[in-house]
C-alpha cells in the first residue's frame, strides 16, 4: 500500500466518481482505476460497489476511509516537519476557506505570501464553514478560515477579521429605496445559502433577534454559492443577506439595492487543530514570528 494509492482512494471516496477524482488529481481515469484495483486486489477486499456505470463506497470502504484519512494526515504532518527544517525555502501550506473569505479576503493575501515565499506550494480548497471545520479536524487542512460559528473541541478558533453584511434586493423590488427596515420581513421571497454556510447562520441569528425563524419566510431557492445568490436576487427571485463585498458590483451598477437592515458585522475566524504543531509556513501566513 502506498500513500499515492491512499490519496487516490480518498479522492474517489469523497467524490464517489472516478472521473472527477482523476480530474482533481490531474491523473488519467485509467491510472485512478488501476490504483484502486491494485489496492483492492493486494488486500483481497472490495472497497467500492460498482453499480451500473457508477461507483459507491461500501461498508468496508467506509471503515477504511477513516484510517486512510488518519494516515494521510500523519504523512502531511511529517512532510511539514521536514519542510520546517529547511526554513521557508520549500514546503506546502494547506488552507481551506469558506466562500466569502476565499473569493474576496484571501486572494490578495495569498499573492503577498507567494511573493515573499515562492518556494511554498499553496493548496487551497473552498467549502462552507462546516466543510472547512471538518477538513481541519481530520487533518486535510492545516488552517481553516471561516465565517460561521464552529463548536468542535479539537479546534482552536481565533479572530481573523470582520465582514459587513447587507440585505439586498433587485432594483425593481418593492423594498428598493426604503429609508427604514421593512416592517414585515415575511412579505418578500428569499434566496438562501445552503445549510452549514456562515452567511445562512448570520441570517438565522438576525431573524431570531426579531422573533422570526427561517420557517416564517418564503424561501424561493437555496443556492450553494454567493455569486449564484447574487445573480438570483438580481433576476428578481427575492431578497438575500450577503457580504457587502459580494454585493458591491451589483450595487455600484444599479442592478441591486441595499435595504436598511440592522445586523452586526460577522467575524472571520482562523481554525487550527489544537494537537497539531503549526508549521513555519502557516505561522508566516498568519504574520507570526513562530508557532503559537
Image: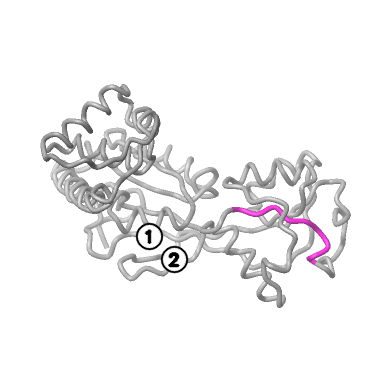
Q: Is residue 42 magenta?
A: no
- Alpha carbon separation for disc pair 2 and 1: 9 Å
Q: Residue at x 30, y 52 (%)?
A: 142
- The residue lying toward the viewer, choosing from 279 and 209, is 209
Q: Residue at x 34, y 28 (%)?
A: 22
Mark 2 vs mark 1: in front = 2
Instruction: Judge left or right: residue 268 versus residue 210.
Output: left
Picture layout, residue 245 above or below residue 271: above
Q: Residue at x 73, y 56 (%)?
A: 190
Instruction: Give the number of marks.
Output: 2
Q: Which residues are magenta?
A: 185-193
Residue where numbered disc 1 is placed: 271
Which is nearer the N-term, disc 2 or disc 1?
Answer: 2
Name of the residue lying farthest toward the front: 52
Contact between marks 2 and 1 (CB within 8 A): the answer is yes
Q: Quadrant of the C terminus?
A: bottom left
Locate residue 33, reporting x and y percent.
Answer: 27, 28
Mark 1 Cα shell of 10 Å, populated few (<14), some (14-19), many (≥20): many
Instruction: Judge left or right: residue 89 versus residue 171.
Output: left
Numbered tag placed on residue 150 in the rendering: 2
The colour scheme applied to this rendered structure is one colour
Locate residue 18, reporting x and y percent.
Answer: 35, 31
Amino acid at each position: 500500500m502506498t500513500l499515492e494509492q491512499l490519496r487516490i482512494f480518498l479522492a474517489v471516496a469523497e467524490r464517489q466518481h472516478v472521473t472527477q477524482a482523476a480530474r482533481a488529481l490531474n491523473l488519467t481515469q485509467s491510472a485512478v482505476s488501476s490504483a484502486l484495483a491494485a489496492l483492492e486486489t493486494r488486500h483481497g477486499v472490495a472497497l467500492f460497489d460498482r453499480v451500473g456505470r457508477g461507483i459507491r463506497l461500501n461498508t468496508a470502504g467506509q471503515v477504511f476511509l477513516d484510517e486512510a484519512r488518519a494516515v494521510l494526515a500523519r504523512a502531511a504532518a511529517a512532510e511539514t516537519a521536514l519542510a520546517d527544517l529547511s526554513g521557508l525555502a520549500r514546503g506546502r501550506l494547506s488552507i481551506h476557506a469558506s466562500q466569502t473569505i476565499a473569493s474576496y479576503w484571501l486572494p490578495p493575501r495569498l499573492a503577498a505570501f507567494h511573493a515573499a515565499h515562492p518556494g511554498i506550494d499553496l493548496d487551497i480548497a473552498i467549502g462552507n464553514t462546516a466543510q472547512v471545520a471538518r477538513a481541519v479536524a481530520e487533518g486535510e487542512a492545516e488552517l481553516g478560515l471561516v465565517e460561521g460559528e464552529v463548536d468542535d473541541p479539537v479546534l482552536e478558533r481565533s479572530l481573523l477579521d470582520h465582514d459587513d453584511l447587507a440585505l439586498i434586493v433587485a432594483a425593481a423590488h418593492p423594498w428598493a429605496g426604503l429609508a427604514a427596515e421593512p416592517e414585515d420581513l415575511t412579505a418578500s421571497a428569499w434566496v438562501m445559502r445552503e445549510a452549514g454556510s456562515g452567511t445562512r447562520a448570520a441570517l438565522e441569528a438576525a431573524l431570531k433577534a426579531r422573533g422570526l425563524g427561517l420557517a416564517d419566510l418564503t424561501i424561493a431557492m437555496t443556492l450553494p454559492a454567493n455569486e449564484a445568490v447574487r445573480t438570483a436576487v438580481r433576476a428578481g427571485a427575492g431578497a438575500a443577506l450577503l457580504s457587502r463585498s459580494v454585493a458591491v458590483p451589483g450595487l455600484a451598477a444599479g442592478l441591486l439595492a441595499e435595504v436598511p437592515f440592522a445586523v452586526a458585522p460577522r467575524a472571520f475566524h482562523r481554525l487550527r487543530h489544537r494537537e497539531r504543531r503549526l508549521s513555519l509556513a502557516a505561522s508566516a501566513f498568519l504574520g507570526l514570528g513562530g508557532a503559537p
